[in-house]
Image: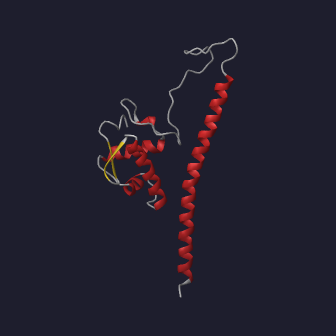
């Protein structure tokens, strides 16, 4: 007959795993929600258009803020790599992955990356890292020369 403490520990582990899975799901849902809010705000601005009789001036009129260079935000799409963009074109989580790999100078697997990022090396965190590095590799930012082993492609670490 199993011990009461053993049963409690088993249930505690199951509850902890469920909480970690739900945290990952929550982060993904919040990122999607944030993108919809931004999209709605952008569409509202576009539909409002410039005030009647006024044209938008590229340099900006007096009192207007100058145009800012768009930076990636959490939940934004990972752009395909092309000559020119630095890793700051990536969302912060993706930038950190590129920086860790660039700093190590060697191939790393997802468990090593999770540990290097200061995350607990548990399935939920490792799978989150795996999905991000797979996306970076698919878009040309990282190389996956051996299955599950990732590295930065020479010249793609930018100014990090």
Residue 73 locus on image (x, y percent): 52, 38
Q: Quadrant of residue 7?
A: bottom right
Relative depth, front residue between 73 and 146: 146
The reply, left or right, for residue 13 in relation to residue 80 is right
Residue 153 x, y percent position in the rendering: 31, 41
Taking the image as shown, residue 144 lies to the left or right of residue 65, namely: left
Q: Which of the colour schemes (rainbow, by chain, secondary structure, one colour) is used?
A: secondary structure
125 relative to 154 in the view: left or right: right
Residue drawn at point x = 35 percent, y = 38 percent: 157
Q: How many marks?
A: 0
The residue depicted at 42 percent of the width and 53 percent of the height is 130
Q: Position of residue 87 (x, y in %)?
A: 41, 37
> Residue, x 61% and y 35% (percent of image)?
39
Image position of 51 (left or right of 58): right
Q: Quadrant of residue 138?
A: top left
Residue located farthest toward the right when viewing the structure as drawn: 52
Q: Nearer the viewer, residue 96 or 128?
A: 128
Residue 22: give x, y in percent of width and height.
58, 58
Q: Residue at 53% x, 70% y: name it.
A: 13
The quarter of the picture where the C terminus appears is: top left
Outermost residue toward the top in this view: 53
């Amino acid at each position: 007959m199993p011990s009461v403490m053993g049963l409690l520990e088993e249930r505690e582990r199951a509850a902890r795993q469920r909480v970690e899975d739900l945290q990952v799901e929550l982060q993904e849902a919040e990122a999607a929600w944030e993108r919809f809010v931004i999209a709605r705000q952008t569409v509202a601005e576009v539909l409002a258009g410039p005030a009647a009789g006024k044209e938008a001036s590229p340099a900006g009129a007096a009192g207007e803020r100058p145009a800012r260079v768009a930076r990636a935000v959490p939940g934004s799409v990972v752009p395909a790599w092309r000559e020119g963009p630095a890793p700051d074109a990536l969302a912060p989580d993706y930038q950190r992955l590129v920086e860790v790999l660039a700093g190590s100078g060697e191939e790393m697997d997802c468990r090593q990356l999770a540990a290097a990022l200061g995350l607990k090396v548990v399935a939920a965190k490792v799978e989150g890292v795996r999905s991000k590095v797979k996306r970076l590799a698919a878009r040309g930012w990282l190389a996956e020369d051996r299955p599950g082993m990732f590295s930065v492609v020479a010249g793609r670490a930018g100014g990090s």
